[in-house]
Structures are given as structure tokens and as C-alpha cells.
Amino acid sequence: QEELVESGGGLVQTGGSLRLSCAASGRTFNTYAMGWFRQAPGKEREFVAAIQWSGGRAYAPSVKDRFTISRDNTKNMLYLQMNSLKPEDTAVYYCGAGRIQSPVRLTTDLGYDYWGQGTQVTVSS
């Protein structure tokens, strides 16, 4: 059974850094696009970053130049390095995987078939 498990969330001060990890199991996700989304209290889930199986990346404008998405296909792992964190980055972060070819569909959650349970990131001011 396919499973995505996020880890690495926590409490950090403004300006700090965190590295989220997503461990995939149950199948090989090498040919899948993978992405990070987040959901803050009272808000809809929003796109953060995504990476194609080929390595092409996409970022939300609000995190570009602060966050870096990467993947290790040999380990079936997805990562999100988050630097210069702000209070508005506070949310539950989810990783997803899907067979997505279109760059536009990378940024919407509709194309993702598998999701993790989420990890909480809290940035204090």
C-alpha cells in the first residue's frame, strides 16, 4: 500500500530554518511529480513547491528564494528546505505525489493521487 509520511516540522523563531522530509513507500515514485502544500487554520490548502521526476521545479511566489525542494529517487524521499521563515509560513505541511506532466497542474492539488498526513510548522514572531 502506498504511503507518504512527512517529518521535520516543529516550532522555530522568525528567520529560522527547518527541513521537512517525506518518505514514500509502497511503490517507486521515481516517475511521479511530488509536491509540498500547506494549510493554515481557517484557510484552504495552498501550493508551496513541486518537483517533476525529471527535476524541474516550481515554487509559489511567497516562498521562492527562501524554500528549496529536492528529491532523492534512490531513497524514495522528498525534501523541503525552508529558510528565513516567517510567521505567515505557519501551517500544516503536506507532501503529495502524482503522475503530472503539465506545469500548471503541478501547482494545484487536483493532480496529486497520494498524500501524507501532514507535519505542523509553527513560526513564532
Image (cartoon, grey):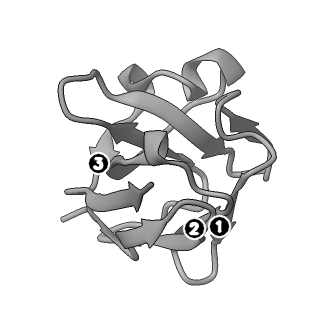
Asked whether 16 or 48 is in front, the reply is 16
User: 83 left or right of 77?
Assistant: right
Mark 3 or 2, nearer chain start: 2
Q: Which quadrant would residue 102 be assigned to in this image?
A: top right
Residue at horizontal 56 percent and vertical 31 percent from the top: 100
Q: Quadrant of residue 116?
A: bottom left
Q: Which residue is at the front of the view, 38 or 24? A: 38
- Judging from the image, what secondary structure is the residue with disc 1 in? strand
Q: Nearer the viewer, residue 44 or 78?
A: 44
Disc assigned to residue 79: 2
Labels 2 & 1 near each other (Cβ < 8 A): yes
Question: Which amino acid type is shown beneath numbered disc 2?
Answer: Tyr
Q: CA distance from mark 3 to mark 2?
A: 14 Å
| Earlier residue among tags 1 and 3 | 1
Placement of 31 over or under 110, stated as above or below: below
In the rendered image of this protein, does residue 116 appear above or below residue 63? below
According to the picture, the residue beneath numbered tag 1 turns out to be 71
Which secondary structure, mark 3? strand
Residue at the (38%, 48%) spot, across then down: 90
Find the distance from the CA under tag 2 to the CA under tag 1.
6 Å
Report the residue marked by disc 3.
Answer: 115
Q: Name the residue furthest top.
A: 104
